[in-house]
């Protein structure tokens, strides 16, 4: 395989990992915990996209044969699926995170409650639409060709879109975090929730904002991956979620550029694994994470936390 | 109750204890399923590949199982010893995710080694016990031993050093506790227990593959501990027993089974943030137990 092809494959997969890790990082920076339901929200985003472009449910599940009475073009369906996923993420926050925060419980518990929420979501999907895989037809992209030549390599349009949309979302998010009132409020809460509250920032609203945004990113990523490789069943988000977790720590918890950098590194490293050793591909990202943590215990771009005595 | 389910519950309790040991000194390590898988492979490879371990009768010899358990525990412990030093410098969620990464790396290695049977794994592992009841008795003895050791730990200097690190690592170091050393001991002990448990489990399940140690298992075993209570050893044991049994007991509700399981995991920590077993509840139970025989056995008249 030639270099350009490896580069494109690696960057487009890495962009998805990055989007995933961004969602984790938004929640982590305001709450200091990891949302294990994130992978399930990503999966839901893919199913929402499939339904919104007019796809019908298969023969299994309670909703067998169901289809929406309208069919949107992919461009309309993707943001709507993101919004749907954001609503689900808000619901997850409401049932699995807020009660713990209100009781000032050990943050470790949120790992378990969010896992419970994820288990419920994944099995709800299975109950409703069955465990079969769904493919989003590539025709959903309208008049765009399936692939195009670039510097002597053939690039699938979907891959280019994945990369472009991820980078766009990242740029918008960074600008918004730095420039807008809410974005800075979010950062203030991430720095110190209590002080932010004293300064008149509604930290509960900021937490909700973080969950909504992370759900939106996950939903969009799910829709894009669904288009790129088809939806392999209710569990298909879990592998990406796990990889996203490794990427998150690799880049440094709570760091937005770190999440993207980590995603691109892991994506590229995986793309470099030759086809005959593809069984080892999954170990590359984790091995990389392991090595980086040994040298830099806070990840590539993570800030060292001061030790409180 | 079905002896097979009971055996799975006991194995769950052993794994929960393995997660509890590092947590007892404040280390959120999720590496248990990785060591469990390694231990299972040791037993599976030895008993299917070495004639002396397989035996000649209907059941494989019991001493062979014991040797496998020792070797499985030793290999898991050695891996933990080798990586423990650098890994245990990580804190909190970083440690948790690094150990999840370790589990995944071990899974990929187990999947791709030339002699571990690939995705299908290893089949037809010989049975040291003809009936599941034999496994139950054996595993119960193992669990009792593990519980006794955990109880002994409370009285030893090592156990108190672990508790001190959990409450405040810096303060513990200031009073002269060798914190890296203590953390490493807890990590290795956890790996050893998981490896031994894997060796028993491989025989019981009759086949073994890389799915034994996965990310899901990491989080499920953590749920055992959080659900049961992470401060006293009866907590993880109870959590492991209950949460392993739950999906099976929920079988009558059919498709809703795993949704209800998720709901239990979601609601458990909300209603019991300290877990089911706490010092106060244990105290109350002891008071009750002390009252009961006295009432029944009190002499009526001198």
Image (cartoon, coloured by chain):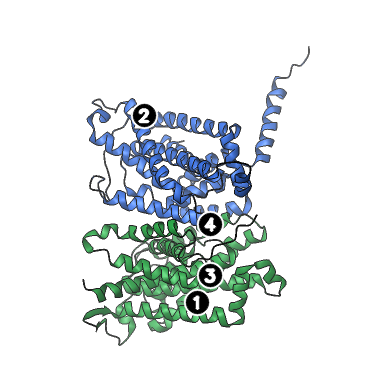
Mark drawn on residue B66: 2
In the depicted structure, whether residue A130 falls above or below residue A5:
above
Residue A95 locus on image (x, y percent)? 59, 62
The chain ID associated with circle 1 is A
Q: Is the C-beta separation of discs 3 and 2 under 8 Å?
A: no
- Count of picture labels: 4
Camera-near label (1 vs 3) is 3
Q: Vertically, is B265 above or below B39? A: below
Mark sitting earlier along the chain (1/4) = 1
Name the spot of residue A27 as percent of width and height, x first. Answer: 54, 67
Residue A194 visible somewhere in the drawing: yes
Picture disc at residue A26: 3
| Chain corresponding to green in the figure | A
Give the CA separation, mark 3 to mark 2.
Answer: 49 Å
Residue that badge 4 annotates: A111
Tag 1 and tag 3, C-beta contact below 8 Å:
no
Question: Marks 1/3: CA distance?
Answer: 17 Å
């Amino acid at each position: 395989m030639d270099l350009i092809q490896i580069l494109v494959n690696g960057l487009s997969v890495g962009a998805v990992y990055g989007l995933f890790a961004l969602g984790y990082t938004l929640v982590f920076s305001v709450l200091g915990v990891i949302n294990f339901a994130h992978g399930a929200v990503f999966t839901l985003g893919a199913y929402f996209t499939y339904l919104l472009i007019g796809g019908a449910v298969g023969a299994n599940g309670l909703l067998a044969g169901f289809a929406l009475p309208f069919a949107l073009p992919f461009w309309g369906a993707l943001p709507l699926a993101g919004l749907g996923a954001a609503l689900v993420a808000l619901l997850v926050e409401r049932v699995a995170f807020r009660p713990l925060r209100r009781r000032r419980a050990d943050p470790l518990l949120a790992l378990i409650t969010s896992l419970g929420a994820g288990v419920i979501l994944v099995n709800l999907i299975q109950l409703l639409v069955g465990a079969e895989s769904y493919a989003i037809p590539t025709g959903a992209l309208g008049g765009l060709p399936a692939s195009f030549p670039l510097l002597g390599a053939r690039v699938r349009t979907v891959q280019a879109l994945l990369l472009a949309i991820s980078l766009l979302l990242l740029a918008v998010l960074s600008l918004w975090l730095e420039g807008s009132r809410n974005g800075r409020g979010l950062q203030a809460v991430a720095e110190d929730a209590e002080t932010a509250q004293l300064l008149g920032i509604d930290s509960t609203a900021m937490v909700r904002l973080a969950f909504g945004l992370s759900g939106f990113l996950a939903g969009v990523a799910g829709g894009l991956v669904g288009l790129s490789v088809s939806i392999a069943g209710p569990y298909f988000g879990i592998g990406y979620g796990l990889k996203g977790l490794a990427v998150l720590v690799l880049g440094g918890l709570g760091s937005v550029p770190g999440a993207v950098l980590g995603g691109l590194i892991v994506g590229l490293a995986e793309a470099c694994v030759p086809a005959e050793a593809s069984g080892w591909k999954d170990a590359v990202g984790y091995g990389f994470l392991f090595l980086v943590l040994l040298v830099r215990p806070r990840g590539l771009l993570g800030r060292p936390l001061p030790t409180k005595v | 109750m079905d002896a097979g389910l009971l055996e799975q519950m006991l194995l769950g309790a052993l794994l929960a204890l393995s997660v509890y040991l590092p947590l007892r000194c404040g280390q959120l390590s999720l590496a248990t399923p990785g060591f469990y898988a390694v231990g299972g492979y040791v037993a599976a490879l030895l008993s299917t590949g070495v004639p002396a371990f397989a035996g000649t009768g209907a059941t494989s010899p019991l001493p062979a199982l014991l040797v496998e358990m020792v070797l499985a525990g030793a290999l898991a412990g050695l891996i933990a010893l080798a990586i423990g030093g650098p890994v245990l410098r990580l804190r909190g969620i970083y440690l948790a995710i690094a150990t999840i990464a370790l589990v995944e790396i071990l899974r990929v290695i187990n999947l791709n080694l030339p002699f571990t049977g690939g995705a299908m794994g290893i089949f037809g592992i010989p049975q040291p016990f003809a009936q599941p009841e034999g496994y139950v008795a054996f595993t119960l003895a193992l669990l009792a031993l593990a519980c006794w050791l955990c109880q002994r730990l409370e009285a030893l200097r090592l156990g108190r050093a672990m508790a001190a690190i959990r409450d405040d690592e810096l303060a513990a170091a200031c009073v002269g506790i060798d914190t890296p050393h203590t953390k490493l001991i807890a990590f290795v002990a956890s790996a050893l227990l998981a490896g031994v448990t894997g060796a028993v489990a491989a025989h019981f399940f009759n086949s073994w593959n890389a799915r034994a140690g996965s990310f899901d298992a990491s989080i499920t075993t953590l749920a055992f501990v959080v659900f049961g209570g992470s401060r006293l050893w009866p907590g993880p044991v109870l959590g492991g027993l209950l949460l392993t049994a739950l999906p099976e007991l929920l079988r009558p509700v059919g498709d809703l089974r795993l949704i209800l399981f998720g709901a239990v995991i979601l609601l458990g920590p909300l209603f019991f943030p300290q877990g089911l077993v706490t010092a106060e509840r244990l105290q109350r139970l002891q008071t009750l137990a002390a009252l009961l025989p006295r009432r029944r056995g009190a002499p009526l008249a001198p």
